[in-house]
């Protein structure tokens, strides 16, 4: 298949929802680099925030989102999210998604920085997996949608300043192929794997952001990376997420002597915003010289814990921790990228023909810090909107001869393992929870050295994104939301209530050149 009406890259919540919208107007190919159900979405635990309960109001969800975003949310985008969210969740329920219920009514839980219980969840702590199950089942019934799994996109094709398709590695034969389309929707998810410590699965390497940047699209707000306070920190265990919903249900953070410490750092204690809890844990770990703190659930009813958090309970058991009787060792890990490919509220990027949605996009809904459980909702709402916009605006396909596929050897396209490892360690050391001029400058020089050694475009993409994140963090001379600089700890609304926006207008040719912050755009308030 070398031509199709629409290409969607990624099969998480945003990609699947976009594909469903697009299928009303033509044939859609969903390309995804692993199994169809391997994505950040699949691992989402806590739930999806939506103002649907009797005690809630859309306006409160709006306010909570803005407060978490620390002054730089795009209010128009937030309004779309909270106002259209209930419609898209109701639609998802009609398509078969089964959220947990109590006495037949939807059950809402609480998470940090939400003023109401507004988080829907499924199978206790498997919300993302249920959303993917329902969306995939729905999408598979639509004959216009074709899935191509294990197909890694490595490049966006551009012609005359327009995105016209993709270059990808064909799953079975190490073939580099091209596919052209009327429009491309980028839904490649987040970039947690740019750090050595992360809750994200292997696929989350930020490819889409780097590809869009290289193709000439603007990227924005990359300095804002959210670090989740509580990833499992047991020896030999992966950095499995220990959901914030545990703290929402009464979990207590304790230091190595068993002392609950959060109220020493913030009066909201365990339910303070995520960045504050993460930095408090880091400070407490440094103060006590311990590599972790504990999340204690042992005062809660064991049956409730097993029922409400079955996946966490079973996963911890595999590593010798029974959460009903033992505290869970946890520490922060990279979790969610607020920035990404800059879009308007219809998912349009600055590159015609290219739309973006979900974690890879920067719609401005999260500002400097995402409110917990807003991203599944964002994927649904803006995935649908990007699909609708592409459907309406895409010109007819211009047929051209597509070059024959080229055989590649794996080293021509897989990540260089050593460079990836060095990048992840560097990013964790200098560009994570606490940053400063010296560390960020060191990281930039080191990344520039690695850029010169990159053997293929995929490795270069990873480094380009690391460079972009680091440069943006160096550029922002203040602390705001998830971006904290210990050399400039205050928030400076007078000068910095702005977004970082970066682009290389001449696209691919400049891929190897160090990216820089090109401009700034005032927040539209
Ligand atoms: P993803 O779901 O990550 O999908 C990206 C897709 O793109 C994948 O299919 C991937 O394989 C594909 N892809 C990537 N690169 C390429 C490439 N080069 N070529 C082809 N395909 C590619 N958010 C909430 O709102 N509530 C929660 O409870 C919650 N819990 C979370 C728990 C964990 C452990 C994690 C990691 C995240 C959690 N989040 C949560 C965040 C949320 O899951 C994500 O932000 C959201 O699911 C992103 O959806 P997406 O569709 O944009 O991307
Ligand atoms: C969690 O369950 O703690 C993750 C929620 C989120 O990232 O939104």
Image: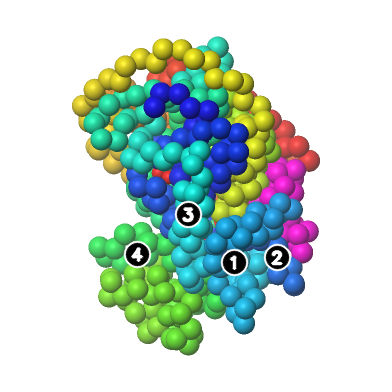
Q: Which residue is mark 4?
A: 233
Q: CA distance from mark 3 to mark 2?
A: 24 Å
Viewer-nearest of labels 4 and 3? 3
* Residue 353 visible in the shown view: yes
- Residue at point 64% right, 76% down? 105
* Residue 430 visible in the shown view: no
Q: CA distance from mark 3 to mark 1?
A: 20 Å
Viewer-nearest of labels 3 and 1? 3
Q: Inspect the magenta stretch and tell me whether residue 60 lies in it.
A: yes
N-terminal-most mark, 1 or 2: 2
Residue 409 place in picture, x, y as percent: 21, 27
Q: Which residue is mark 1?
A: 120
Magenta part of the chain: 57-81
Q: Which residue is mark 3?
A: 137
Secondary structure under tag 1 reads strand
- Residue at point 65% right, 60% down? 90
Residue 39 place in picture, x, y as percent: 42, 49
In-front residue for pair 467/77: 77
In the image, residue 214 above or below residue 523: above
Viewer-nearest of labels 3 and 2? 3
In-front residue for pair 487/254: 254
User: Principal SS element in the magenta part?
Assistant: helix
Residue neighbourhood size for the residue with mark 1, other residues' Cα within 10 Å, grouped as few (<14), some (14–19), many (≥20): many
Residue neighbourhood size for the residue with mark 4, other residues' Cα within 10 Å, grouped as few (<14), some (14–19), many (≥20): many
Q: Are marks 4 and 3 in contact (CB under 8 Å)?
A: no
N-terminal-most mark, 3 or 2: 2
Q: CA distance from mark 4 to mark 1?
A: 27 Å
Secondary structure under tag 2 reads loop
Q: CA distance from mark 1 to mark 2?
A: 9 Å
Residue 281 is left or right of residue 117, and the answer is left
Q: Are marks 1 and 2 in contact (CB under 8 Å)?
A: yes
Secondary structure under tag 4 reads loop
């Amino acid at each position: 298949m070398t031509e199709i009406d629409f290409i969607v890259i990624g099969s998480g919540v945003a990609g699947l929802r976009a594909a469903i919208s697009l299928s009303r107007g033509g044939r859609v190919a969903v390309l995804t680099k692993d199994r169809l159900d391997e994505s950040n979405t699949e691992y989402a635990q806590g739930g999806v925030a939506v103002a649907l309960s009797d005690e809630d109001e859309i306006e409160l969800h709006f306010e909570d989102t803005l407060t978490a975003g620390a002054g730089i949310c795009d209010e128009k985008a937030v309004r779309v999210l909270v106002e259209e969210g209930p419609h898209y969740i109701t639609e998802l329920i009609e398509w078969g998604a089964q959220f947990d219920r109590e006495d037949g009514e939807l059950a809402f839980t609480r998470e940090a920085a939400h003023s109401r219980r507004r988080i829907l969840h499924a199978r206790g702590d498997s919300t993302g997996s249920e959303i993917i199950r329902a969306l995939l089942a729905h999408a598979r019934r639509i004959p216009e949608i074709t899935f191509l799994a294990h197909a890694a996109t490595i490049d966006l094709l551009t012609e005359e300043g327009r995105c016209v398709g993709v270059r990808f590695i064909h799953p079975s034969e190490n073939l580099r192929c091209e596919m052209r389309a009327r429009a491309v929707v980028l839904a490649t998810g987040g970039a947690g794997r740019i750090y050595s410590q992360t809750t994200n699965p292997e696929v989350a390497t930020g490819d889409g952001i780097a590809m869009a940047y290289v193709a000439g699209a603007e990227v924005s707000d990359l300095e804002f990376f959210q670090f989740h306070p509580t990833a499992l920190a047991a020896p030999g265990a992966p950095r499995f997420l220990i959901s914030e919903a545990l703290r929402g249900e009464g979990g207590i953070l304790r230091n190595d002597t068993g002392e609950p410490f959060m109220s020493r750092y913030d009066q909201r204690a365990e339910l303070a915003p995520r960045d504050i809890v993460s930095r408090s844990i880091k400070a407490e770990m440094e103060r006590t010289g311990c590599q972790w703190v504990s999340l204690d659930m042992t005062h809660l009813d064991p049956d409730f814990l097993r029922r409400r958090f079955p996946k966490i309970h079973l996963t911890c058991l595999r590593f010798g921790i029974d959460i009903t009787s033992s505290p869970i060792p946890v520490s922060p890990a990279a979790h969610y990228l607020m920035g990404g490919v800059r879009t308007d509220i219809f998912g349009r990027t600055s590159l015609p023909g290219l739309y973006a949605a979900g974690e890879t996009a920067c719609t401005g809904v999260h500002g400097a810090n995402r409110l917990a459980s807003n991203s599944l909702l964002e994927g649904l709402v803006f995935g649908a909107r990007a699909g609708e916009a592409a459907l309406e605006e895409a010109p007819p396909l211009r047929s051209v001869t597509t070059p024959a596929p080229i055989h590649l050897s794996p080293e021509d396209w897989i990540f260089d393992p050593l460079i990836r490892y060095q990048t992840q360690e560097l990013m964790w050391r200098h560009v994570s929870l606490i940053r400063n001029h010296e560390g960020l400058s060191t990281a930039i020089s080191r990344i520039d050295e690695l850029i010169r050694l990159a053997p293929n475009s995929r490795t270069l993409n990873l480094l380009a994104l690391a460079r972009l994140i680091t440069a943006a963090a160096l550029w922002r001379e203040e602390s705001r939301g998830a971006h904290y600089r210990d050399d400039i700890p205050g928030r400076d609304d007078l000068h910095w209530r702005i977004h970082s926006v970066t682009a290389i207008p001449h696209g691919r040719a400049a891929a190897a050149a160090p990216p820089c912050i090109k401009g700034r755009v005032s927040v539209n308030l």
